[in-house]
Image (tube, rainbow, N blue to C red):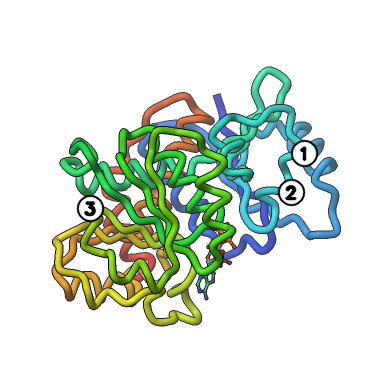
Amino acid sequence: MFYQLGLIGYPVEHSLSPWIHQSFLKNAHLQGRYDLIEVHPEKSLGDILIELKEQHYTGFNVTVPYKQKIMPYLDKIDTSAEHIGAVNTVIYRDGNWIGYNTDGFGFVRALEYRYPEVIEKTNIQVLLIGAGGAARGIYAALQMKDVERIDIANRTRTNALKIAKQDQTKVKTDIYSLEESEKRLNQYDIIIQTTDVGMKPKQHKSIISLQNLEQPNIICDIVYQPISTNFLKNAKQRGAKILQGHLMLLFQAQRAFEIWTNQAVSIGKMDEQLKQLLE
Ligand code: ATR
């Protein structure tokens, strides 16, 4: 079997996905390729899917600006993508294009990889900062892990409410402003920054101040450029354990690779290698 894989988006040229998936193909001793497929916004996604089918693509990743736009063109949407309202992985199976979202799952795997003891604990209290697509995916994936509470802090309260409302589960959720959350940091075992605040080239200061942080909790940032955001640097200075965003990038890709190939693949030395690529 030859795995014909790729990434559609605009732009795509700086993506790390070719490096990641070519490494997975090598680690798993599988034959295949991973192409960057730049899709100009003028082009029809329906036509793109016809072309990819003719070219025998196994599947592909989807990035900005098509994660939502592609959904009406697919034949089926897995619950992972339905929850989030966005697709990042597509497979062609039995004549159907099927859309998944591996972001939330990838985050939870990254957390388990770095801090395996934490997710086993009961009564875990989480603070999610941000209420966009990434937050939605992480919220859904954490619910499957028996987390007791996932509070959301966001600039716009109504956006946070949308996440809490759509998921009718046993998880407790309160909504806070960013300022309010700064006074509650010690209530949480895990704090997860899910916005793009802190990303290159702007690299703003932290989305919230961590000056009240006293507990040795785990602080995560999904931003991976730079590899250590100012938010994470502050967290480290205050004695927190940190989880860098490149691990979520790796593990969401690992999940996509599993969907395409139906095989487990190890990340091997890719954690360190990716860090070096990003530094
Ligand atoms: P994605 O789908 O990639 O997660 P998104 O849907 O645009 O991105 O969501 C971005 C998140 O970052 C939102 O929670 C947004 O806050 P609002 O809901 O108030 O828009 C948050 N965000 C982006 N820029 C921000 C900033 N400068 N300060 C605070 N929050 C910001």
Secondary structure beneath dot 3 equals loop
Measure the alpha-carbon separation of dots 1 and 2.
7 Å
Secondary structure beneath dot 2 equals loop
Displayed quadrant of residue 23: top left
Image x and y of residue 195, in percent: 48, 64
* Disc 1 and disc 2 in contact, CB within 8 angstroms: yes
Q: Circle 3 sits on which residue?
A: 189
- Residue nearest the observer in this picture, 4 or 183: 183
Q: Is residue 238 above or below residue 176?
A: below
Measure the alpha-carbon separation of dots 1 and 3.
38 Å
Image x and y of residue 126, in percent: 31, 51
What's the amino acid at mark 1? Pro
Q: How many marks?
A: 3
Q: Is residue 67 left or right of residue 182?
A: right
Secondary structure beneath dot 1 equals helix
* Disc 1 and disc 3 in contact, CB within 8 angstroms: no
Residue drawn at the location 39% of the way across and 81% of the way down: 205
Q: Is residue 173 left or right of residue 185?
A: right
Residue drawn at the location 44% of the way across and 46% of the way down: 138
- Residue 69 is labelled as 2
Q: Circle 1 sits on which residue?
A: 72
- Residue nearest the observer in this picture, 254 or 241: 241
What's the amino acid at mark 2? Lys
